[in-house]
Image (cartoon, rainbow, N blue to C red):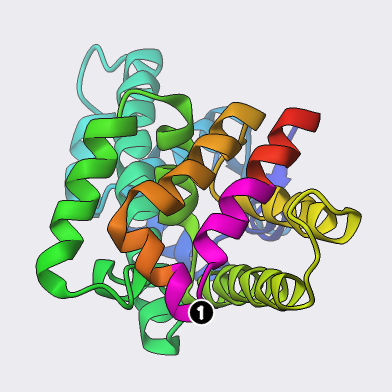
Amino acid sequence: MAYTINKLALMAGVSVRTLHHYDAVGLVRPAARSASGYRLYGEGELLRLQQVLFYRELDMRLEEIGRILDEPGYDPIAALETQGRLLAARAARIAALIKTVDRTIGRLKGEIMLSDEELYEGFAKDKVERIKSEAKERWGGTEAYAQSQKSLAKMTKADWARVKAEGQAIDEAAAQAMSRGEKPASASAQALMARKYEHLRSFYEPTPEMFAGLGSMYVEDDRFRKHYEDIAPGLADYLSLAMGAFAKER
């Protein structure tokens, strides 16, 4: 089948002017000309043009491309395999660059994931590394820890703001329930614990045992106890009991 220069240009995504130039420098010449003098290209020229365009994607000069294609013993299959590997490597580099661009845009827009200091807001700087180290030592080998690290790495500041706001709303609602005299095992308190349990899924998939253990940590670890006691005196114990009752029912 013969192709006109306009048809070939459209198929290959190049300009007619480019094909004129390739013809002029002897890189891709037409197989024949029509009675009216129009350039006609066949399958051989299509494949040669494809090779030229592959090499151009690798930033090779036209003179070098012509020398390679015209070498005695040139193997188009071996060349395609090599080009495929080189293009795949370039694609990986471009993908990495795109990711960097996206992260830079996110940082400039204020959407990039927050720093450790922002994540541990409220804790003194000298305690951040200690908390991280303790968390890794205590849970580093668990699936929940791995899940939480992946979840945090994907969060933008906007995501974190939503998650943080929900956690604060739950704790404040629990403090209000406690002030109204609602028992930790009451239906209203347990509804809040179901909400708290669901909130943990922003980080990892909890189990009832893990949920109860987290509640125990609220009263056993002075840093967590202080955090909840600052919201409302007695809240750490209230949450621990409510979370334990919720876990027991599960």
Q: Residue at x 37, y 87 (%)?
A: 108
User: Quadrant of the rendered structure where residue 100 is?
Assistant: bottom left
Name the image quarter holding the N terminus.
top right
159 or 119, which lies in front? 119
**Is residue 119 shown in magenta?**
no
Q: Of all residues shown, which one is farthest toward the right?
A: 187
Few, some or many residues within 10 Å of mark 1 (<14, 14–19, 20+): some
Disc 1 secondary structure class: helix
State whether the magenta stretch is mostly helix, strand or loop. Answer: helix
Q: Identify the amino acid type marked 1.
A: Ile
**65 shown above or below 140:** below
Residue that badge 1 annotates: 231
Q: Which residues are magenta?
A: 228-242
Measured as percent of width and height from the top left, residue 156 is found at 48, 70
Q: Position of residue 18 (x, y in %)?
A: 46, 65
In the rendered structure, the answer to whether residue 171 lies left or right of residue 249 reads left
Is-magenta flag for residue 229?
Answer: yes
Q: Considering depth in this image, is 75 or 184 the residue closer to the camera?
A: 184
Picture coordinates of residue 133 (x, y %)?
18, 45
